[in-house]
């Protein structure tokens, strides 16, 4: 019983605590304790590399150290799990697609698979093939699908004949026409794109004009709404095929004068309550495009019969401030607008202006009017008060102050030049300005007697500093133009005045120089310039044909030699113009001078008979001179 009890008791548990790692085979050798079974993966590793101390399984196999591509050494179906019978045919090693941690998920690399050979594997047996509900096609999988997943897929309609959409889009093979589709026998691609069903464009091309109601009947497609203007016209008489609005109502065919048939306030907008009383049809005044602007035709209105309507009740009448008159409106006003209006003075006796222009009936003489008993029309026109013309014809010369005394008429202002002369000595009878002041009798040089800034215009603050009298430079007719005499100005002292404050100075874009103005400019005007004399010891006069900026390219008086190694010779500026082919040293063999040898262009050079250069064949004395104007 004791033995039986021991056999039926709990399974013993061995505590591996204290067992050194890697010493498993000391006990697990098949004798002392369970060892490696016959079907164990061949390995010399210790048990605890893969197994736990609590149980043999699950075990973890560490593939570290296993060479890539050697999977079948173990995974051959005998030593370890091999390729199952339904595996995709391949000679690749396991680790090309599978991980060492588990068989799945696996990644199949299509690298190396020839495009268009998908069905070799994807035939429904070897690998997933075309599903039963697949769009009928003989194309290979990769035409639409990616190698990473079946979806999303892209169907390429290239090669699909235009108008053959229903071959697939028939509701069975692929999405077809829905039940609420506009009835049509057209192919899908007439309105839809191959990329998506919407947006779609319905082409009304081929739709017979006037047959809109065939579709637009409220059932097949949008029809006429309940608030539509009653009409038996087809939609396209007013609407466009691109959109319902904006729409254009064509009044073509509407009998002139029959507007009220529709424009009766019920069917369409009618005459508003504040409309002018009239039995005329709308189109007499209004256009078919819009109510306003409108034109009221006075054509049949009897001239002089304006008050029949313009009585202040039926239409605008004469305002309270109107000129008293019993004349009809059209005598002064136009039928197009009240203003401007023209009052005809025809029939008004000349000189009888005050009959109306008395300040009550019509505008009269204002309080500040020139005192006169003359009639208005002596100075004013019948078209307007101003401009007015005062005739000085009978006014005695020199008696201006009789009226122009500051009370009766404009007098001499406070800032007037002190004078006892009559106004007409300087002013005209037509206007105060322009006026002409006669300096006759004014002593030359006595200008500042008046031109002192108080009596008359004096020297302004920005005037050139001078104690000369005005008439030395200015004329008596005008301040400008003025002539300044530089006679007593010391040569070279120009900037005493020409410093930009006292007088015009050197502008910002002026040639950079410390020279005085009169080195280049004349006293009569800034331009034309004088001929400039160069003072540089290294400059040789070049004569005519040379502009300043040919050398002074940086707009500066002082310039650097372009080729300073050759200064002060010609080549310091002209080394880049040296043509070796023009300067032979020996004819045969051909040897040329260098620019360094001939840097003084105006010097002499020789052509030698041979390379010893001992016998001169030809001399060229001073072939080039600065004054030649060119190298030739």
Image: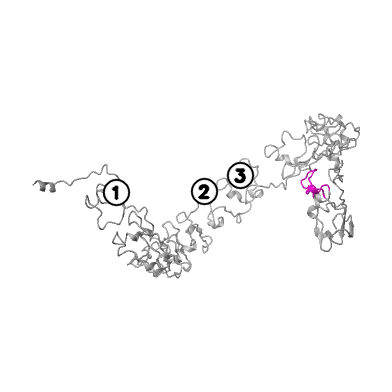
Q: Is residue 57 above or below residue 219?
A: above
**Which numbered disc, 3 or 1, marks the residue that appears first in the sequence?**
1
Point 89% across, 31% down: residue: 446
Q: Is residue 102 above or below residue 392?
A: below
Element under label 1? helix
Please give the label number shown on residue 632: none
Residue 141, x across and y down, in percent: 40, 66
Element under label 3? loop
Please give the label number shown on residue 274: 2
Viewer can see residue 315: yes
Residue 453, x across and y down, in percent: 81, 30
The span picked out in magenta is 547-568
| Residue underneath mark 1 | 48
Element under label 2? loop
Side of 584 relative to 328 (left or right): right
**Which numbered disc, 2 or 3, marks the residue that appears first in the sequence?**
2
């Amino acid at each position: 019983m004791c033995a039986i009890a021991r056999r039926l008791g709990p399974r013993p548990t061995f505590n591996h605590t204290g067992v050194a790692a890697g010493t498993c085979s000391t006990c697990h050798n098949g004798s002392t304790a369970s060892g490696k079974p016959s079907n164990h993966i061949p390995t010399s590793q210790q048990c605890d590399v893969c197994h736990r101390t609590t149980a043999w399984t699950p075990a973890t196999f560490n593939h570290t150290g296993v060479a890539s591509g050697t999977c079948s050494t173990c995974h051959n179906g005998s030593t370890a799990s091999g390729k199952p019978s339904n595996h995709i045919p391949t000679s690749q090693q396991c680790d090309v697609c599978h991980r060492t941690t588990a068989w799945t998920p696996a990644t199949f690399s299509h690298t190396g698979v020839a495009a268009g050979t998908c069905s070799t594997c994807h035939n429904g047996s070897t690998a997933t093939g075309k599903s039963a509900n697949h769009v009928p096609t003989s194309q290979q999988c990769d035409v639409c699908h990616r190698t990473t997943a079946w979806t999303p897929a892209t169907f390429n309609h290239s090669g699909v004949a235009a108008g053959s959409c229903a071959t697939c889009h028939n509701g069975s093979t692929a999405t077809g026409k829905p039940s609420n589709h506009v009835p049509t026998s057209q192919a899908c691609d007439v309105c839809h794109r191959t990329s998506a069903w919407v947006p779609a464009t319905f082409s009304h091309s081929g739709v017979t004009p006037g047959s809109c109601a065939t579709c637009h009947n409220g059932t097949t497609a949008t029809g006429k709404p309940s608030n539509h203007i009653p009409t038996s016209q087809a939609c396209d008489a007013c609407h466009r095929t691109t959109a319902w609005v904006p729409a254009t109502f064509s009044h073509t065919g509407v009998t002139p004068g029959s507007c009220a048939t529709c424009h009766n306030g019920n069917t369409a907008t009618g005459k508003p309550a504040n409309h002018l009383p009239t039995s005329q049809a709308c189109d007499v005044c209004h256009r078919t495009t819009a109510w306003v602007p409108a034109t009221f035709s006075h054509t049949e209105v009897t001239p002089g019969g304006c008050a029949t309507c313009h009585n202040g009740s039926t239409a605008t009448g004469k305002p309270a401030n109107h000129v008293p008159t019993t004349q009809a409106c059209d005598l002064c006003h136009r039928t197009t607008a009240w203003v401007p209006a023209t009052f005809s003075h025809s029939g008004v006796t000349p000189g009888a202006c005050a009959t109306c222009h008395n300040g009550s009936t019509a505008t009269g003489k204002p309080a500040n009017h020139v005192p006169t008993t003359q009639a208005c029309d002596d100075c004013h026109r019948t078209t307007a008060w101003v401009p007015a013309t005062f005739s000085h014809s009978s006014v005695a010369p020199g008696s201006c102050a009789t009226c122009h005394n500051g009370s009766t008429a404009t007098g001499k202002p406070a800032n007037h030049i002190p004078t006892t002369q009559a106004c007409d000595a300087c002013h005209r009878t037509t206007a105060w300005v322009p006026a002409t002041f006669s300096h006759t009798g004014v002593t030359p040089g006595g200008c500042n007697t008046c031109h002192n800034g108080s009596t008359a215009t004096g020297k302004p603050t920005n005037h050139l500093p001078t104690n000369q009298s005005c008439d030395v430079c200015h004329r008596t007719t005008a301040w400008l133009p003025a002539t300044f005499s530089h006679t007593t100005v010391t040569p070279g002292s120009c900037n005493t005045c020409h410093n930009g404050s006292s007088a015009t100075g050197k502008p910002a874009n002026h040639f950079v120089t410390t020279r005085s103005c009169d080195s280049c400019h004349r006293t009569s005007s800034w331009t034309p310039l004088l001929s400039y004399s160069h003072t540089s010891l290294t400059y040789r006069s070049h004569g005519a044909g040379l502009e300043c900026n040919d050398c002074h390219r940086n707009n500066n008086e002082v310039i650097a030699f372009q080729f300073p190694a050759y200064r002060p010779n010609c080549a310091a500026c002209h080394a880049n113009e040296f043509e070796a082919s023009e300067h032979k040293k020996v004819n045969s063999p051909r040897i040329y001078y260098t620019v360094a040898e001939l840097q003084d262009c105006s010097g002499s050079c020789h052509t030698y008979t041979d390379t010893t250069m001992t016998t001169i064949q030809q001399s060229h004395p001073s072939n080039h001179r600065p004054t030649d104007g060119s190298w030739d």
